[in-house]
Each structure stands twice: as structure tokens, then as C-alpha cells.
Image (spheres, helix red, strand yellow):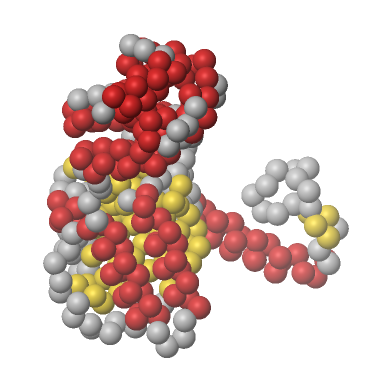
Amino acid sequence: MMIPPPGFPEGFPGIMIPPGRRKAYCTVCDFFVKMLAVFLQMGGCRMDKQILLVNRHWHDINPVDCGREACAPGHSFGPAARFYWLLHYVIQGRGAFTAGGKESPVRAGQMFVIRPFEVSYYEADRREPWEYIWIGFTCGIPLPECLLQEAVVNASRCGSIFSSMLEAENQTDSRELFLCGKVFQLLAALEEKPAGGEDYVEQARTYLEANYMRDVSIGELAGKLNLNRSYFSTLFRKKTGKSPQQYLTDYRMGRACQLMTEHGYSPGKAALSTGYPDIFSFSRMFKKHFGVSPREYSRRQTEKEEFL
């Protein structure tokens, strides 16, 4: 006989149940329907992976909890407090984190920080629920300032470190030691300060001087430095007094003069050696820069040397 599962409407695809087993079947179905309801009430969070650890009571870094979780829409946890540090790195999706009475949005590439004995609450977004990796640990060493001051930290550069923590599951007797190393690696990455404005400019100058003979794009250079082009140009001009493009042009012209006067290059050969596709664009820029054509410049330099 074909019957639908309990709680489902008539016409729902049924299954064949022997006459003597119908009562047992309905009892089992009732159990699973109730369990499904409890699961949905809890927010439907799916524990993908939790790594079982032994508390080694180490002083410097002592890992006590680690795992990965994908959450159903609106799943929440807390308010609750723990005795250890707990860092969640969001792989994808978004949610909200509340600590100290302040709610902060959290998106992929960010990490939210739960400090020891701090009451916190966090909830997955209902449209784009988050998936995260977490690491919990006690420690007896100074921590990066961002962990002490910030509730949410931009940590995209640490994503690979968090992902590699899950490899601890493959360890047998050294899970805690493995994770201890990963936490140290994470703290080192968080302690590393982003390059300052002067560092960016020096990196850009070195790049331009090493690649002046190529078809250099200032926009692409800004991208290599992970900077907005306008902001990059402002930094560069503030440091050098020139725009990046003007700096590149001046450097090319200086090299072209050197190639023609010291190494006997023809204007055409000097053009190709300094990043210009043809003699015409090179000559036009050269004359604008020096007031004379490349050929005239070479002639005058030769006459000057002969006179000396």
C-alpha cells in the first residue's frame, strides 16, 4: 500500500509499506518530523567539521577549539561568554556580531574577535548566511593590537592560514602542536603592518626604473600595489613632486640621452629601447621635453665633445 509520510498532504509521493509495518513506520516518521522541527527552530546550522582537541595547558599558545561551519539563514549563537580567545574567519556570506553592546556587520574576508569572558552574540544573514572557520585558544603572550582593540578585523590575507588549520584533523598525536604553529603564523600575519605611503612610492619608483623600456601602464602599477589610481598618484606626487607618468617620461628621456650620447644609439634604436613603439612618438615627446629633436640633440652633443 502506498501512503504519504505523516504530516504531508494527500497526493504526496508515497512509499510501499507492508501492512504489518505501518504502525512502526508512522512512529519512526513522527520522530524524524519532530527532529526536523527542532533542527529548524535551532536555525538549521550545519556543523561541517569540528576538530577534537586535548587541552595541553600550554602557557604561550594553547589551542582548545577549532572547526568549520556553514550556517542556515538567521542562525544565531549567544549571548554567551568563554574563558578563551575565539576568532572566526568568514569564508563566504555575511552576518552580524555583537559584543560590548555594539553590533558590527561582518562579511567574507573579515574576522570577528571574541575575547575571554566577553559576552557576545552573532547571527548569520538571512539572505547570505555565512560560513566560517574558527580557532579558540588561551595564551600568555602579547597579542597584536587589532585583537585587543577591534571587534571586526579585515583579514583576507589570513584566509589561507585559517583554511590550513583544518588539516589538523589529519594529525594523530600532534593536533594541538600543529594548531599552535598555525596560531603563531596567524598572529605574525596580523602583526605585519601594511606598507605606508613612502613604501608604496619607493616600490613604484623601483618598478618604473626597472621597466621603463616596456609598455608601462600607471593604472596597472597602482593595481599591483592594491591602490586606487587617484590615491596612488596623489601619494606619488606628494613624495616626488611629479605624477607617475611624468616621472616615467623624465626617466625615459634621461635614458634615451644616455644611450644616444654614450653608447652611439640612433634615435630609432633609442626609441625602441625606452618604451616607445616608433620614432615618431619618441621624437615628439623628446622635442617637447628638450626643445630639439633627438637627431639635433645628438649632433650638438657630438660637436660639444669635439670642441672639448
- The C terminus is located in which quarter? top left
Total labels: the figure holds: 0
Is there any visible trace of residue 9 in the rendered image? yes
Q: From the top left corner, tell me how far across and down residue 79 is, in percent.
A: 25, 54
Q: Nearer the viewer, residue 255 or 186?
A: 255
Identify whether 210 is placed above or below 230: below
Residue beneath the point at 36% across and 52% down: 157
Q: From the top left corner, tell me how far across and down residue 272 is, in percent.
A: 52, 29
Residue lying at the far right of the rendered structure: 1
Q: From the top left corner, tell me how far across and down residue 2 is, in percent.
A: 83, 55
Q: Quadrant of residue 303?
A: top left
Residue beneath the point at 75% across and 52% down: 4
- The N terminus is located in which quarter? bottom right
Q: From the top left corner, tell me how far across and down residue 171 is, in percent.
A: 47, 81
Left or right of 209? Residue 82 is: left
Is there any visible trace of residue 119 in the rendered image? no
Residue beneath the point at 55% across and 21% down: 278
Residue lying at the far bottom of the rendered structure: 173
Identify whether 236 is placed above or below 120: above
Left or right of 271? Residue 286 is: left
Residue beneath the point at 52% across and 24% down: 268
Left or right of 46? Residue 187 is: left
